[in-house]
Structure formats: C-alpha cells, structure tokens
Image: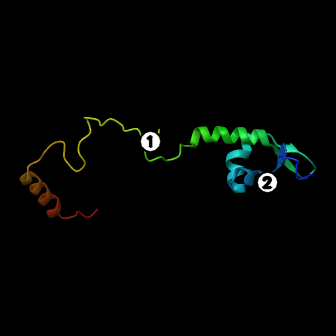
C-alpha cells in the first residue's frame, strides 16, 4: 500500500473489534448494541457486523441519550426550570397546625403506655 493512498475503514467489523470501535467493553456491547445488529458469518468461527449499521445505532443512541456539551454562557436543553406548584407545602411544615399543648399531650400518651404481652 502506498503512503499516498488514503486509509479506508472496513465495511465489516469483526465481533472482537466492534466494542472497541464504539469505545465500550464487550459486555456492554453484547447488552446494548448486539441485539440491534445483523450478524454476518464471515467464516465458520468469525462473526462480523456492518460498520454502517453500527454507526446508525450509535447515531440513534446519541440522539436518545446524549446531551450537548456544557457551555457556561448557554443554558442546557435539559436544565429547564420547572414551575413551582402552589399545592406543594414547604418541607418540614405541617399542613394542619397543631398546638404545642396537643402535641405534648399526644407524645405523653404514646410514651407512657406499657406494652401488652401478646
């Protein structure tokens, strides 16, 4: 091969190389990617996958799971502020206020009762 010749990517990628092509380990490849690809038998023992099909899966996965790079001056698409509900109470406050006397009385009743043998 001449040094002036551009390097070509193979159309078929062997199973042993496919996880590396996507930058993941074999277990993750088998779990996430392999069920969506067509297996091509290139010999009795060798399995390969179409590179274009792998890249199509990667594009789909990126569109579903990716997010834009974090830029300081721009707000990210998934950081939209959600409107605050007026129905939600403040954390740590009661919706029905009890007087301190009623609470103390209820606490005394609970702590003073003896356990019954069952």
Towards the viewer: 53 or 111: 53
In this rendering, the answer to whether 108 lies above or below 71 is below
Where in the figure is residue 64, as x and y percent of width and height? Answer: 58, 38
Towards the viewer: 62 or 43: 62
Secondary structure at badge 2 equals: loop
Where in the figure is residue 39, as x and y percent of width and height? Answer: 82, 43
Residue visible at 67% across and 53% down?
28
Residue visible at 46% across and 40% down?
78
Where in the figure is residue 115, as x and y percent of width and height? Answer: 22, 64
Residue visible at 93% across and 49% down?
43
Identify the residue under disc 2.
17
Identify the residue under disc 1.
74
Residue visible at 19% across and 42% down?
95
Is 93 on the left or on the right of 22, as rendered?
left
Secondary structure at badge 1 equals: loop
Towards the viewer: 47 or 69: 69
| Quadrant of the drawing holding the C terminus | bottom left
In this rendering, the answer to whether 77 lies above or below 27 is above
């Amino acid at each position: 091969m001449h040094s002036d010749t551009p390097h070509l990517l193979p159309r078929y990628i062997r199973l042993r190389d496919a996880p590396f092509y996507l930058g993941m380990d074999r277990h993750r490849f088998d779990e996430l990617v392999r069920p969506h690809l067509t297996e091509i038998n290139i010999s009795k023992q060798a399995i390969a996958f179409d590179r274009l099909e792998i890249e199509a899966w990667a594009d789909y996965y990126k569109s579903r799971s990716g997010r834009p790079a974090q830029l300081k001056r721009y707000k990210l698409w998934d950081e939209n502020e959600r409107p605050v509900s007026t129905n939600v109470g403040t954390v740590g406050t009661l919706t029905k206020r009890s007087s301190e006397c009623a609470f103390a009385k209820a606490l005394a009743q609970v702590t003073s009762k003896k356990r019954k043998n069952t």
